[in-house]
Every structure is written in C-alpha cells, then in structure tokens.
Image (cartoon, rainbow, N blue to C red):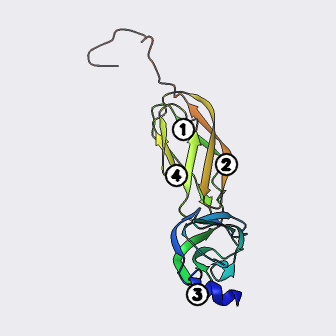
Amino acid sequence: MALMNVLASGALAAAPQVDSIAPNSGPLTGLTAVTINGQFSGVLTVTFGGLPGIITGNSATDITVLTPAGLEGAADVVVSTLLESTTVTSGFTYQIPPVIISLLVATGNVSAAFSYQITSLGTAPLSFSANPLPPGLTLSGNTISGTPTQAGIFTVNIGASNGAGSDSRPLVITITALLVPSISAVSPAFGLTSGG
C-alpha cells in the first residue's frame, strides 16, 4: 500500500536530471568522492560502468557517491530510481596516475639552446609543472627549453598530474659558462709583409 501511494504521488516517476559530475575522473582503485548535481527524487543506485557506487549523501539537488574500482577509460554513469534511470555517457573516466620516468639530470651551457622533456607514464591528458627554473628557461607542455643566461647547479621540482593523482621529482640542471678564448699579446708584434 505504501509503495502504491508513492507511485501515485509521482515521487518515483520522474527520471533523474543530471547537470554535472565532479570530479569526473579518478584512479582505478575507486573510492573517489563524486558529487552529482541535478534534480533528483527517490534515487536508489548510481553505477559507474555497470558497477554500483556507495551513496553517502542524497538530496533533491545533490548526490554524493564513492566510485567503485574500474578499468582504465571512460565509464557511463547511470542514476536510477525504482522506475526510471538517466545515463551520462562517458560521465566518469578511470585513469592511471602519473609516474615520471625521464632522467633526473640535465646539462647545458650559457647562451646555448637548451631543451629537456618531462616523460611520464599515466593516462592522458597530463599536466606538467617545473619550478623554479634557471634564468632563461621556460616550460611549455612537457618541455623545458630556452637559452640559459646564468651558470650554476639548479634543482627544479618537476611534476606530472591527472585526475587520478600526481608525481613529482627533483631534476638537477647544470648550466656551464663556456670559456671564450682571448688574445692578450702577440709576439713578435712585427714581421715581414711577405710572411715568414
């Protein structure tokens, strides 16, 4: 009787309306705390790639849920009541966290072109960071490049991150000032025009 009254009231009749999912990515191990925003009434389950998440909060406008473990790649998110469901195609992406694998030493010379690439495992897209950089160098994408203007040994904290996590390592960049040969005297200072 109670169920018939609920059905008659239309509380479970309207399909869930999903406006946003945040964050929309996380590690394969699951347990990412996700907030789903929208319009909801009587939501019973939220699945990610067909596997149920753990609902920890449920209101008319927000659902909080812990993701299950999953495989790398995009997963459909399905929000369901007793009678209706709404699917967000590729609503959540399972990612492998970054692991930086590039060499952690680099060398260059003052006034000479320099380039170093941060290489990392992990699911794309990856974001990269590097600081503080030696004078004259900048980071673009995953590449540190430019023309060094100061000699020295510089420790740079390089990082890579995605929705599943981040990794950082110390990179040691050694910049050398090249010695330019100079002439202080010529002996003898005179000679025959014909040479010799």
Indicate the position of residue 41 as horizontal and vertical percent values.
59, 75
* Residue 156: assigned label: none
Q: Tag 3: Cα neighbours inside 10 Å, few (<14), some, or many (≥20)? A: few
Q: CA distance from mark 3 to mark 1?
A: 76 Å
Residue at 47%, 23% in the rendered image: 181
* Residue beneath disc 1: 108
Of marks 2 and 1, the one in the foreground: 2
Residue at 57%, 43% in the rendered image: 130
Q: Quadrant of residue 8?
A: bottom right
**Number of residue marks:** 4
Q: Tag 4: Cα neighbours inside 10 Å, few (<14), some, or many (≥20)? A: some
**Type of amino acid under label 3:** Ala
Find out whether the residues at labels 2 and 1 contact each other: C-beta distance under 8 Å.
no
Image quadrant containing the C terminus: top left
* Residue beneath disc 3: 8
**Vertical placement of residue 132 versus 37, above or below:** above
Q: Is residue 32 visible?
A: yes
* Residue 142: assigned label: 4
* Residue beneath disc 2: 168
Q: Residue furthest top?
A: 189
